[in-house]
Image (cartoon, rainbow, N blue to C red):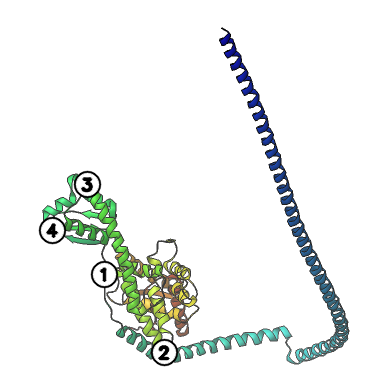
């Protein structure tokens, strides 16, 4: 028992000693931690103070630099102000000197004006005295004499003017007719022409009626898919081994023809394949348009055209005007223009360039409500063509005023290309209406008895009454009708106006 108590006491003493030692160790460690923290805080404090001082010095330096710059600006501004003040003072002195000079000149002019007014009054008195003396001698007042002189001069001037005009016109005809015919004939002779008549239908040939059935498809779904994808009406009739493609747009017909050719060659014909082939062919046709435009410009020796203009030139291959292929017409016009410009001593390259581009407004999709000549001129201006080229394009149908020598050449060559036999086909109704309008226009003039449009509208014969229209009036009437036709009608080539005045003497033998 005593040993147990001694053991417990020894254990308690050991635990107590250990606790005391552990407490001292903890206290020592806490003092050490506090000391280290105080040291670190002191170091951080010093670092922050140093950083603050450095920042203060930087801000101070920047502030001083800014103050220095402001001071320099202020000094410079003051110097400029002083210079301006000096300049203004100098100008003010000069203005004062000039003002004195002007005042002196004004005084001199005033004195001279007074002298002139006095002399003018004296001259007026003398003139009135002379007029009174002349009126007394002639027995007419000044107004009556002036009216008589004006009337006599009017009649004399009118007669001489008509005679002078007739002489000039006769001389011009003698000198110009032969030369102009030579130039036009030589121009046409030197240009190779080719007629290309476009229709509104294309015939697609097939090998057998079995392929025709495959093109139609089950319940007509294939043919409906082709029509929807191309915008072309496909006519399948009893004609053996042929299908008719109908559309007003030659480009659409060409896309449909090429697509059908690929579908028939490949053998797979169904709606999905049709759309795929049509899209592929459409891209091929667009690429071919660009290639055609490039080839055309190379053939004609025209360089530096904008890519969009080249594309429009190629697009003309798939357009027609009154049955005449537009690209062929433009190429022909370009060659005609170059030859005619060379004969007249003008620039053939510019004339050829304007001749090729004169109808690009017909193939553009922009602003279709504008006349094609105006639209073509705007496109040429948009793509940086020269002003004389743009004016020639816009003026070839007289929508704008001609400002260059090339413009009338383009107009003439366009008419030559379109008016030659076989080049174009017009609808019969519009052709008949144009001839009727031509005859009706001349009937409105006084003294006209009958009118006849002959030679397909190339000549208008006007028969007048001899008692109402004199020979001189007949010349004036022919000129007036020609001017009215130019301003009010559209026609290819030129119209010859012949006024016929005949006198008949009739007697009867009984």
**Mark 1: which secondary structure?**
loop
Disc 4 versus disc 2: nearer the observer: 4
Residue at 46% from the left image edge and 88% from the top image edge: 169
Disc number placed over residue 176 in the picture, else none: 2
> Where is residue 426, by image quadrant?
bottom left
Which residue is disc 3 drawn over?
221
Which residue is disc 1 drawn over?
197
User: Which x, y percent locates residue 26?
Assistant: 65, 29
Mark 2 or mark 3, earlier in chain? 2
Whether pointer 1 and pointer 2 mark residues with C-beta atoms closer than 8 Å, the reply is: no
Mark 1 or mark 4, earlier in chain? 1
Disc 1 versus disc 3: nearer the observer: 3
**Mark 4: which secondary structure?**
loop
Disc 2 versus disc 3: nearer the observer: 3
**Mark 3: which secondary structure?**
helix
The answer, for residue 459, to whether it is visible in the render is no
The answer, for residue 42, to whether it is visible in the render is yes
On screen, residue 220 versus residue 457, left or right, reads left
Q: How far apart are marks 4 and 2 (CA)?
A: 59 Å
Q: How far apart are marks 1 and 2 (CA)?
A: 35 Å
Q: How far apart are marks 2 and 3 (CA)?
A: 67 Å
Disc 1 versus disc 2: nearer the observer: 1
Residue at 18% from the left image edge and 50% from the top image edge: 216
Q: Which of 347 and 120 is in front in this view?
A: 347
Mark 2, Cα crowd under 10 Å, few <14 / some 14-19 / many 20+, is few
Mark 4, Cα crowd under 10 Å, few <14 / some 14-19 / many 20+, is some
Mark 3 or mark 4, earlier in chain? 3
Residue at 32% from the left image edge and 63% from the top image edge: 286
Vertical position of residue 53 compared to residue 401: above or below: above
Which residue is disc 4 drawn over?
241
Q: Nearer the viewer, residue 272 or 321?
A: 272
């Amino acid at each position: 028992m005593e040993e147990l108590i001694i053991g417990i006491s020894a254990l308690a003493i050991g635990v107590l000693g250990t606790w005391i030692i552990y407490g001292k160790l903890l206290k020592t460690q806490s003092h050490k931690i506090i000391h280290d923290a105080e040291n670190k805080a002191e170091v951080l404090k010093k670092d922050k103070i140093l950083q603050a001082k450095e920042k203060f010095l930087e801000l101070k330096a920047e502030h001083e630099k800014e103050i220095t710059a402001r001071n320099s600006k202020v000094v410079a501004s003051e110097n400029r102000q002083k210079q301006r003040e000096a300049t203004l003072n100098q100008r003010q002195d000069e203005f004062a000197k000039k003002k004195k000079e002007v005042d002196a000149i004004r005084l001199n002019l005033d004195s001279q004006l007074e002298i002139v007014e006095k002399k003018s009054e004296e001259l007026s008195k003398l003139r009135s005295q002379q007029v009174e003396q002349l009126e007394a001698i002639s027995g007419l007042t000044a107004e009556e004499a002036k009216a008589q002189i004006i009337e006599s001069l009017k009649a004399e001037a009118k007669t001489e003017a008509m005679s002078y005009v007739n002489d000039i016109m006769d001389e011009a005809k003698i000198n110009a007719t032969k030369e102009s015919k030579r130039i036009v004939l030589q121009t046409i002779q030197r240009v190779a022409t080719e007629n290309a008549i476009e229709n509104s239908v294309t015939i697609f040939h097939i090998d057998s009626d079995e392929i025709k059935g495959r093109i139609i498809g089950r319940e007509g779904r294939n043919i409906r898919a082709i029509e929807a994808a191309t915008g072309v009406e496909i006519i399948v009739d009893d004609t053996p081994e042929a299908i008719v493609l109908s559309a007003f747009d030659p480009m659409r017909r060409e896309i449909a023809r090429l697509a059908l050719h690929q579908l028939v060659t490949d053998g797979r014909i169904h709606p999905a394949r049709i759309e795929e082939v049509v899209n592929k062919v459409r891209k091929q046709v667009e690429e071919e348009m660009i290639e055609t435009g490039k080839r055309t410009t190379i053939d004609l020796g025209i360089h530096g055209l904008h890519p969009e203009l080249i594309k429009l030139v190629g697009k003309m291959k798939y357009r027609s005007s009154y049955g005449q292929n537009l690209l062929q017409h433009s190429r022909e016009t370009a060659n005609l223009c170059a030859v005619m410009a060379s004969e007249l001593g003008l620039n053939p390259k510019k004339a050829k360039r304007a001749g090729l581009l004169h109808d690009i407004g017909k193939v553009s999709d922009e602003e279709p409500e504008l006349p094609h000549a105006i639209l073509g001129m705007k496109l040429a201006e948009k793509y940086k063509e020269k002003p004389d080229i743009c004016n020639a394009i816009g003026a070839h149908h007289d929508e704008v005023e001609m400002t260059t020598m090339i413009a009338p050449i383009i107009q003439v060559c366009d008419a030559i290309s379109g008016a030659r036999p076989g080049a174009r086909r017009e609808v019969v109704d519009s052709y008949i209406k144009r001839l009727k309008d031509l005859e009706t226009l001349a009937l409105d003039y006084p003294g006209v008895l009958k009118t006849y449009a002959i030679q397909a509208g190339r000549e208008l014969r006007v028969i007048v009454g001899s008692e109402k229209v004199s020979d001189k009036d007949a010349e004036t009437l022919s000129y007036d009708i020609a001017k009215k036709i130019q301003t009010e009608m559209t026609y290819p080539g030129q119209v010859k106006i012949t006024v016929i005045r005949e006198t008949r003497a009739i007697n009867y033998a009984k």
